[in-house]
Image (spheres, rainbow, N blue to C red):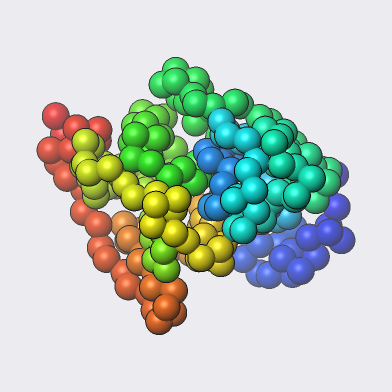
Amino acid sequence: MTDLARYSRQVILREVGVNGQHLLRDSTALVVGIGGLGAPASLYLAGAGIGRLILSDRDHVERSNLQRQIIYRSADLGRSKLDAATDNLRALNPDCEVEARPGPLDDTALLAAVNAADVVLDCTDNFPSRFAINRACVAARKPLVSGAAIRFEGQIAVFRPGGPCYACLFGEGGDAAETCEEAGILGPVVGVIGAMQALLALQLLLGIGEDAARLHLWDALTLSWRRLKMARDPRCRVCGDA
């Protein structure tokens, strides 16, 4: 039974309602990477009443994480991120089933995790992982919510089955991505993008909103957004006609 009192502030929304809340309860989200993006995303998903969260990460909590990865506490230093995140998510919402799948996931394990989910959130920070997640989502025909942030810049996009995929936009084998360790990051920047990933995932699950084939770019210094239309590449090595 769903605890409607817990979710009353969103159940009252016409776009959610009791039926939508039950839909969230019966849904599964896969979050790959429980760092700056995955931390707020997973907290908001658990808070919203997602019935099952599958988490994957391979790191341990370090002191430098605490500046922006808000799911962790100083007492978690040295712990596996999966263990610490699981405990803190269960403390937030005991009704949310949290399943941990230690990374790095090989292609077979990643595809199995994607197949078990209704929506996938890519919260990783490197191109090899992003491309692997994209390939699995295309193969399993699952929607992918991709986010990235560095310095004062963020980007987010939804890739739906049948539309352009992540590789259409960036092309596999591209340049290595800068890391926050190298270039820096202001904590709330990843907080905003991670929260937006949770928002878009909830919209997908509820069947509301409209964000077809758009890449959203955010400048945190000017608080400005740009939207770019994405197109499917028929020659794409992942989703192309070949």
**Viewer-side residue, 227 vs 24:** 227
**Viewer-side residue, 182 vs 58:** 182
Question: On the image, which quarter does residue 198 sit in?
Answer: bottom right
Quadrant of the drawing holding the N terminus: top right
- As drawn, is 131 to the left or to the right of 1? left
Q: Is residue 120 above or below residue 216?
A: above
* Residue 139 locus on image (x, y percent): 36, 28
Q: How many marks?
A: 0
Q: Is residue 26 visible?
A: no
Quadrant of the drawing holding the C terminus: top left
Q: Give the farthest residue toward the top.
A: 108
Q: Is residue 91 visible?
A: yes
**Viewer-side residue, 174 vs 233:** 174
Q: Is residue 74 above or below residue 81?
A: below
- As drawn, is 35 to the left or to the right of 221? right
Q: Is residue 237 above or below residue 24?
A: above
Q: Residue at x 71, y 62 (%)?
A: 17
Question: On the image, which quarter does residue 99 sit in?
Answer: top right
Q: Residue at x 79, y 45 (%)?
A: 75
* Residue 16 locus on image (x, y percent): 66, 62
* Residue 85 locus on image (x, y percent): 70, 41
Q: Residue at x 23, y 37 (%)?
A: 172
Q: Residue at x 59, y 26 (%)?
A: 102
- As drawn, is 153 to the left or to the right of 172? right
